[in-house]
Image (spheres, helix red, strand yellow):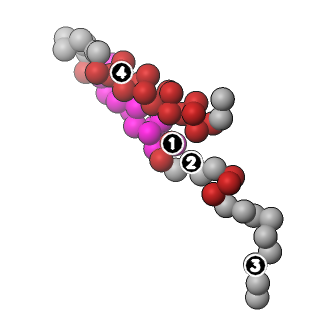
Amino acid sequence: MSRREQLEHEVDLAGKRLDELPPDAPEEVRQQMRLEYDDLSFDLNNLYDDSDFDLTTPIDE
């Protein structure tokens, strides 16, 4: 499993856990779960694949 696939899976799971959180859950728990979801989403959105950047090609001057 690639890093991108792993992060997509983790974001999906965190989102489902947040959606399924009971309404009477403590606010601290809700905030922590939201922070986890946001952190994973941030990591996924800022992830780049090696194929996106070909670093082996020299830059012409």
Q: Secondary structure at mark 3?
A: loop
**Helix, strand or loop for the magenta stretch, by majority:** helix
Mark 4 neighbour density, 10 Å: few (under 14) some (14–19) many (20 or more)? few
Q: Which residues are magenta?
A: 28-43
- Dot 3 amino acid type: Ile
Classify 40 as above or below 27: below
Q: Secondary structure at mark 2?
A: loop
Q: Secondary structure at mark 1?
A: helix
Labels 4 and 1: the sequence-earlier one: 4
Q: Residue 44 got which mark?
A: 1
Mark 2 neighbour density, 10 Å: few (under 14) some (14–19) many (20 or more)? few
CB atoms at circles 1 and 2 under 8 Å apart?
yes
38 magenta-colored: yes
CB atoms at circles 4 and 2 under 8 Å apart?
no
- Dot 2 amino acid type: Leu
Query: Residue 32 placed where, x, y %?
Result: 37, 25
- Dot 4 amino acid type: Lys
In-image side of 36 versus 25 (left or right): right
Residue 57, visible in the rendered structure: yes
Q: Residue 53 got which mark?
A: none
Q: Quadrant of residue 24?
A: top left
